[in-house]
Amino acid sequence: APERVEEQLLEIFSTAAVTHLTQILLSAFFPMQAADLAEWESDAEAFAHQELEEERLRLRQTSETLFTTLMQQRTEVVSQVTLQMLEHAVSQPLDASQPVRAVLYREALYNAVGLCSYELQEHLPFGEWFRTRLVHELHGNHHLQRLIRRRVAMLIGSWSDAFSDAAVREEAYKVLLELLRDSDMAVRVNACEGLLRLIDDVAFYPEPFAPHLVPAVSALFDLFGEAVEVDTKLRVLNALSILMANMSVHIRPVVSGILQMVPRLWEEAREEHLMKGAVLVTITRLVQALGPEVASIE
């Protein structure tokens, strides 16, 4: 009977069992392994895109799926355990004295917070946590600092709904623009993704972003030029297209630069039809944003 099945499931997935399973997942299966770090070191850009893909049957990715399912089904228990583990992990300062396993564990818990932003929104004041904790962890001197910098960019994207406060959103813009200029390509790719989430959001308004427009477009073009992966170039073009659409007439300061880049963008596309389509969409959005002003462009 359905009732009996439900009783058995509750017995199997008791509070104690779910607590223990969550602890094992986050401490043993979520942290990056030596092979992951080697992949990152070998090709940071390709690694970033592998991490963004969802359909991968690696142990860490399948563990993430199990964790998110547990969070959805037993939100109160799993969120409490996750936040307790997080609080304990961040009680230690992130500096060069921290052992590698501590940094990997911290990054793993930040990953968990990003995966379950919806379920955790009632339990974690993310905007405040971002300003008081995450921003200050960007500039440590640990040799694995890039893991945290990349994860902060991903958290901004995952928690884009939490940036309705103007001051917190302004801080997020500054952080993402800094990370778009990072020396590590994986950090830059994920910063582009984070920016894309913030500008393609109901809380986005063009006026507050206007001071960041020129440096943002410049950083995106530089990323496009240095990228090898087509996926990176497509993400950059997507971010530019959304900027064109959402900045509307405020796009004027970068029009000349974008138009000068069009031949290069088209040349880069070559036989990549998806990229050619993305270039055309970007130009279309630019024309639409300018409206009647487009006639005045020389």
Image (tube, helix red, strand yellow):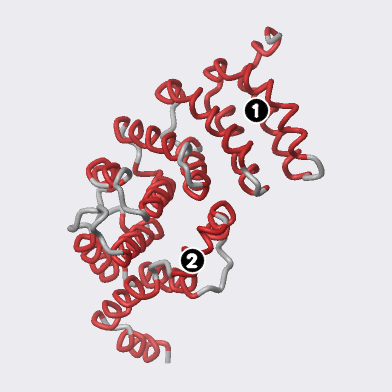
Q: Work out whether 77 lies above or below 86.
A: below
Q: Work out whether 284 lies above or below 293.
A: below
Is tag 1's residue or tag 2's residue first in the polypeptide sequence? 2
Q: Is residue 40 left or right of residue 165?
A: right
- Expressed as whole percent of the image width and height from the top left, the position of residue 220 reads 56, 34
Q: Secondary structure at mark 1?
A: helix
Q: Nearer the viewer, residue 75 or 143?
A: 143
Q: Nearer the viewer, residue 225 or 118?
A: 225
* Residue at the right extreme of this rendering: 271
Q: Quadrant of residue 170?
A: top left
Q: Residue at x 55, y 30 (%)?
A: 243
Do the residues under discs 1 and 2 have CB atoms within 8 angstroms?
no
- Expressed as whole percent of the image width and height from the top left, the position of residue 34 reads 44, 69
Q: Is residue 189 left or right of residue 163?
A: right
Residue on which the image places disc 1: 285
Q: Secondary structure at mark 2?
A: helix
- Expressed as whole percent of the image width and height from the top left, the position of residue 200 reads 50, 38
Q: Work out whether 162 lies above or below 122.
A: above
Q: Quadrant of residue 53?
A: bottom right
